[in-house]
Image (cartoon, grey):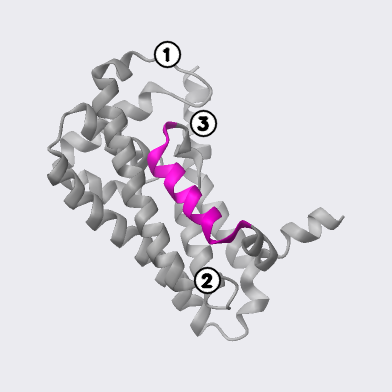
Amino acid sequence: MTSMLFFLQPELLVGTLGILGVIAIIFSETGLLIGFFLPGDSLLFTAGFLASQGYISLPWLLVGTFLAAVIGDSVGYTFGRKVGPSIFNKDDSLLFNKKYIVDAQSFYQKHGKKTIILARFIPVVRTFAPIVAGVGNMDYKTFLSFNIIGGFVWTWALLLLGYGLGAVIPNPDKYIIPVIAVIIIISIVPVIREFLKRWKSK
């Protein structure tokens, strides 16, 4: 009962998770191969929303998540450079599907260098886009410039959007749980859809 009440109080959850926890999740989603399932969009928006109520520091969120996003993509790029095209031959597993890499490659071929910016707003693709850039030996200075722009726009836009919503809604404390629930549902829809596609194809 106590644990259930804990999860129904977002201020306690975020307070426990803390800024370092939020930063770690943002880094993991963009920098680790298995981080594709993490809800970066909803986490940023929710953190911004709760920051408007004083549960967490907005300035530290803005700086920390931006750095985590940039460093995370750089780690993904480095991994792609080292692993190279052999990643396309990696066997499917519970946490990896070659389709993710292929989809990211197709997106990259369609949008070119802008993929590093655009992919920030697309779940799953944002995890694998920097890896594909590394596999394709994209010039690192060019990659870094797009990485910085994308990381800045993604983290700051969602954090400030959540913060702004929390600041303009009257008595926002009453809406914290519903808002977070809607955000979580929206963020997991693409993941559920992807798993359903894989299940049907099998």
Q: Which quadrant of the view contains residue 61?
A: bottom left
Q: Name which residue lies at 47% across and 54% down.
A: 23
- The percent position of residue 82, horizontal first and vertical second, equals 27, 24
Q: Which residue is mark 3?
A: 195
Q: Name which residue lies at 49% across and 69% down.
A: 48
Between 52 and 20, the one nearer to me in the picture = 20
Dot 3 falls on a residue whose secondary structure is: helix
Query: Does the magenta portion include 25?
Result: yes
Q: Would you say the residues marked 3 and 1 are in contact, meaning their CB atoms lie under 8 Å apart?
A: no
Q: Would you say the residues marked 2 and 1 are in contact, meaning their CB atoms lie under 8 Å apart?
A: no
Q: Which residue is mark 1?
A: 91
Q: Which residues are magenta?
A: 17-33
Foreground: disc 3 or disc 1? 1
Q: Earlier in the sequence, mark 2 or mark 1?
A: 2
* Label disc, if present, on residue 49 of the rendered structure: 2
Q: Earlier in the sequence, mark 3 or mark 2?
A: 2
Query: Does the magenta portion include 39?
Result: no
- Tell me the CA gap for discs 3 and 2: 29 Å
Q: Is residue 149 above or below residue 191?
A: below
- Tell me the CA gap for discs 3 and 1: 17 Å
Residue type at mark 3 is Phe
The single residue placed furthest to the right in the displayed view is 1
- Classified by dominant secondary structure, the portion drawn in magenta counts as helix
- The percent position of residue 178, horizontal first and vertical second, equals 64, 66
Q: Is residue 80 above or below residue 58?
A: above
Residue type at mark 1 is Asp
Residue type at mark 2 is Phe
Dot 1 falls on a residue whose secondary structure is: loop
